[in-house]
Structures are given as C-alpha cells and as structure tokens.
Amino acid sequence: MQELPEIFNRFKDDIDKEMQSIISAGSLPLYDMLKYHMGWIDEKGESGDFGKGKFLRATLCILAYISTLKEEEKEKISFVMPLAGSIELIHNFSLIHDDIQDNDRQRRHRPTLWSIWGKPQAINAGTTMKVLANLAVTRLGNYGISCEKQLEVFRIINESCLKMLEGQYLDIEFEDKSEVSLDEYITMIERKTASLIEGAILIGAALNIKEDELEKFKKFGNFLGIAFQIRDDILGIWGSQDKTGKPHASDILKKKKSFPIVYTLNNAPDKIKRSLLKIYESKRITGSQMSKVLKYLEDVKAKKFCEEKCRYYYELAVNEIKKLPVSQNYFQSYYEISDFLLIRDF
C-alpha cells in the first residue's frame, strides 16, 4: 500500500481535532452516530481509532491556504481549520447518504452507519453533519475574518455541495439508462467528485487572495478531481479488498455504471453490449455473471483505457500547478498529492 504524502500526516491530527470539536457540540445519541462514522468510537460507544479517511479535501484546503500566505503570516495556520473541518464534514455527509442510496454495508472495513442504525436515522445523521459543516464556517469570526470573507467561502462551499448533489442525481439516473456517453460520464464526475475537491482548494486560497484570482486553483482542482474519480472507478473493480475496504469488483456487484462499464458499453460489439446490459438488469449479480463482466472489460481493454484517461487528467492538473500563485516551497506538496492520487491503491 502506498504511503500518504507527508503533508497528510502533518495536518491529520489538527483536522481530526477540529472535526471532533465541531461534532461534540451535541449530546444526543445522534452525535454518537457521527462519531462512529468518523472512526472515533465503535457501535457500543467505546473510544478508539477505527479507521479514518485520508482527509484529502481538508488537506488540500489547508495547503491552498498556507501556500498563499505571506511570509509574515505563517503563524496564522489556525485560521483555516474551521474550513478544513467543514469541507471534510460535507464529504462525509455525502458518504453517509451515498451508502444509503447504494445499499452499501461496508465502508473503511466497518459496517456502514445505516446498516447498524437503519436508513431513517442514518439520513438524519448525514443531514446533521451537513448542517454542522455550514455552522463551522461561522467559527472564522473567532479569528477576526470579516463577514464578507465568511460569506464568500460559505458561497463557495455550498455551490460545491450543490454541484456534488447534481452529480449524485446524474449518477443514480445513469443506472436506468442503457446509453451513457463518455462525455456525459465525465460531466457527472465533474459535479459529483471534482466539485468538492475544487471547492476545498478554492476556500483555502480564498482566505488570502481575491476572488478574481481563483481561476487557476479552480482548473487545478477540477482536473485533479476527475483523475481522482477515474482512479476510484478503477479501484472499484480491480482494487484489493484488503486495501480499499470494499469487496472485489464491488462496483459490478452494485451494478454501477462506472467509467470502465461506460467505456465497455460504448466500445464493445453489440453482442457483448446486449449481454452486459442484461446482466445489469438482473435483480442480483451472481459470481458467474461478475466473471463474465470482468471478461468483457478485459476484451475491450477497459482498464488500460481508464488508466490512460486518469493519467491524461493528472497531467492536465500537474500542468496547472506551475501556474498557481503560491509560495515556491509548497509546489512539491502539490506535485506529491497529485502523484499519489494517480497511483493510489486505497
């Protein structure tokens, strides 16, 4: 398993502490559900480290902030923490709801929230996390950040969240469509995944630079987010269960029209296409059907195509890094994160 870039380890404890502070505001058992999802407690309420996420979005937010600080302002790192916590909580709100919509019973090697507490309460928990994420932005006032700047980052966060929900709508809609083009799929993941990665970078940079100077960060985040999701789609079929925490070929078992499947439906002979669609219309995909789908993907070299497309967007993202108005000593961190996302196995 690849190791996370150093900058992830540098800030993970601060991010975790900020989110715990945000969530600890409530005392109902509802908040224990949030703590469980975040990996802070088990289902019995016992404390521990039960597998946390990578904090990718929060880390990108912090990197965008510290890399645009002036030299004399380096001690102001705490100013960005409410935004890092907010964007990470929004991501996790989406995961809670996504698990419900996909009927996923496992995440990060543990039972999902809804599989323990039921879907109605899991919906409450996810929505609560989203509200707490919005309220976290107001913590910027504790650091003297102006109301105007708070409103700007609040707008960016919620516009990103809205795009993410639009993408989730399209993703679910694709399940019932036999024809989904590659361009339609890229448009979907630009919304569902890239929007929040892009938003994380934008809000971090927005604390230090003017709105009309954010376009370069926006492009970088967009390309990076698309590459991230294509890599995720590769892992969703060919990834190792030990590393991803999900069953082998889980996206096939869930009948997701991920990038490899969309590519195959657009490039396989009609006979294979008809067979693949028929399998996806089954109530439940069997082991033999899954093997057949994997063979179809192999026939059209779907994995190779997806890896090439992932690298294409990675290279677009890397080309944007050199244009970013950031301190010279932080360029390496941007490159390391981009490199990691290209080859990650979890």
Image (cartoon, rainbow, N blue to C red):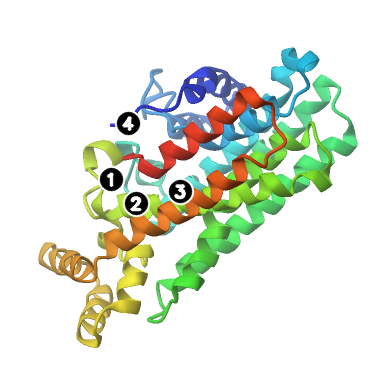
| Extreme-left residue of the structure | 288
Q: CA distance from mark 3 to mark 1?
A: 17 Å
Would residue 28 be found to the left or right of residue 53 on screen?
right
Who is closer to the viewer here, 109 or 75?
Answer: 75
Foreground mark, 1 or 2, reads: 1
What's the residue at 36%, 71% (across, down)?
Answer: 262
Q: Which residue is mark 2?
A: 104
Foreground mark, 2 or 3, reads: 3
| Tag of residue 246 | 1
Q: CA distance from mark 4 to mark 1?
A: 17 Å
Q: Quadrant of residue 276?
A: bottom left
Mark 2 surroundings within 10 Å by alpha-carbon count, few (fewer than 14), some (14 through 19), many (20 or more) = some
Q: Nearer the N terminus, badge 1 or badge 2?
A: 2
Say what amino acid the circle numbered 4 marks. Answer: Gln
| Tag of residue 228 | 3
Q: Nearer the N terminus, badge 2 or badge 3?
A: 2
Q: CA distance from mark 2 to mark 3?
A: 21 Å
Q: Is residue 312 visible?
A: yes
